[in-house]
Amino acid sequence: MFKVHTYNQISAKGLDRFPREHYEIASEFSSPDAILLRSQKLHDEVIPESVRAVARAGAGVNNIPVADYTHRGIVVFNTPGANANAVKELVASALFLASRDILGGMNYVQSLTDIRDESEMSKLLEKQKKQFAGCEVAGKRLGVVGLGAIGALVANMAVELGMEVFGYDPAISVEAAWRLSRRVQKMENLQSLLAHSDFITLHVPAIAATRHLINSETLRCLKPSAVLLNFARDEVVDLPAIVAALDEKRLSKYVTDFPAPALLGRKDVLLMPHIGASTEEAEENCAVMAADQLMDYLENGNIRNAVNFPATKMARNGGYRITFCNENVPRVLGHVLSLLADRDMNVIDMVNQSREEIAYNIIDVASEPSEELLAAIRAVEGVVAVRAI
């Protein structure tokens, strides 16, 4: 029986994925096997030694001390793409709100509380509506920075809206490339994309390489009339540089899902309260994906969409399964295989993958591994964690 400790309000559709004859799900456990959460911050929490995996029902994992967990052999999962359509639709609304003063016009209408005559209101609005005029997005140029699950959807959507779309992603995967419309034009560098675009939308992860990707230097590449949309992460932009560009009229508008005090009260900024994934469908999709990934890991040792371990999958071919992770250094796997050979353990199948400083192994053996063998594997220099499944 596996125990899964939940934080926050997890969608019932996700929780229902766990068969109750094999899983206990609760908000408190003394020795859980895994943790399923949304926004709960774990940096200051001491989690039990029993925990083998943490799954975040969402894309960002800045609420999880990933490096610490990696050193303990804890796999950290996220759910990339599960909220992609929700974010895409919000970006669509942002494009329209930025191209025409829709909010200004609506707020103006609501302010006319002293008018009681419909004819008078109609005449006034006909006279004043020109101050809320704007442009159409059709025919404009959109630059999409980051062409993963969300960026590809946004780019394809913009093509259908009649926009000329440019894309930039030096780390684009083959899978993402297949999803992308042929009408999206590839740009060789960020500066070129920024210079060509009327609207720029950011869809890159918050990692060291993307911190302050948009800064005082890159902002100089923009047209003064350009509109910048940030629905990625707040760390992706250098906020003081954004404010300076707006003040100096080198940037027309900034639209973001990550408000900050320095942006409040500005007419050239549109702020949303971090609602990119706040739809019922997105929350359900994230919870279902997180639950499925946890189950596959706990039951089979397979890893998909981990942020700190390599993607690793092997079909069950009978026998018993041993999994272990180790520091990505030479001779660890060979030492473990020698331990199996010394005990006449026949290896049916195996897979070994590595990612940066960590390596992960799945080994199927013909006979049941003893506690003595597992202890011997744990004692191998470089081995971080071992499981028998």
Image (cartoon, rainbow, N blue to C red):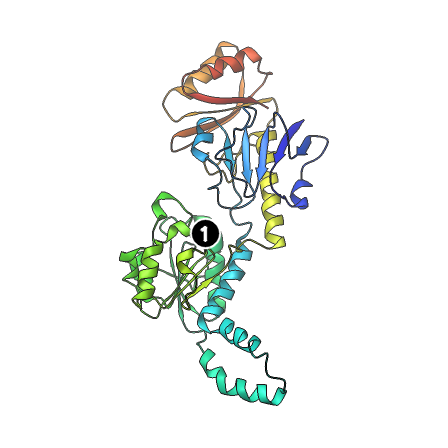
Quickly name the residue at label 1: 148
The residue lying furthest to the front in this view is 114
State the residue at coordinates (36%, 55%): 239
Residue 72 lies, in percent from the top left, at 47, 26
Location of the N terminus by quadrant is: top right
* Label 1 residue SS: loop
The answer to whether residue 249 is above or below residue 387 is below
The residue nearer to you, when weighing 199 against 382, is 199
Residue 21 lies, in percent from the top left, at 73, 31
The image quarter containing residue 366 is top right
The answer to whether residue 302 is above or below residue 324 is below
Residue 341 lies, in percent from the top left, at 49, 13
Q: In the drawing, does residue 268 fall left or right of residue 5?
A: left
The residue nearer to you, when weighing 137 against 253, is 253
The residue lying furthest to the right in this view is 21
Q: In the drawing, does residue 262 fall left or right of residue 91?
A: left
The mark tally for this picture is: 1
Location of the C terminus by quadrant is: top right
The residue nearer to you, when weighing 46 against 16, is 46
Residue 351 lies, in percent from the top left, at 48, 28
Query: Does residue 247 appear anywhere in the picture?
Result: yes
Q: Which amino acid, mark 1?
A: Gly
Query: Does residue 353 appear anywhere in the picture?
Result: no
State the residue at coordinates (53%, 54%): 84
The image quarter containing residue 163 is bottom left
* Label 1 packing within 10 angstroms: few (<14), some (14-19), many (20+): many
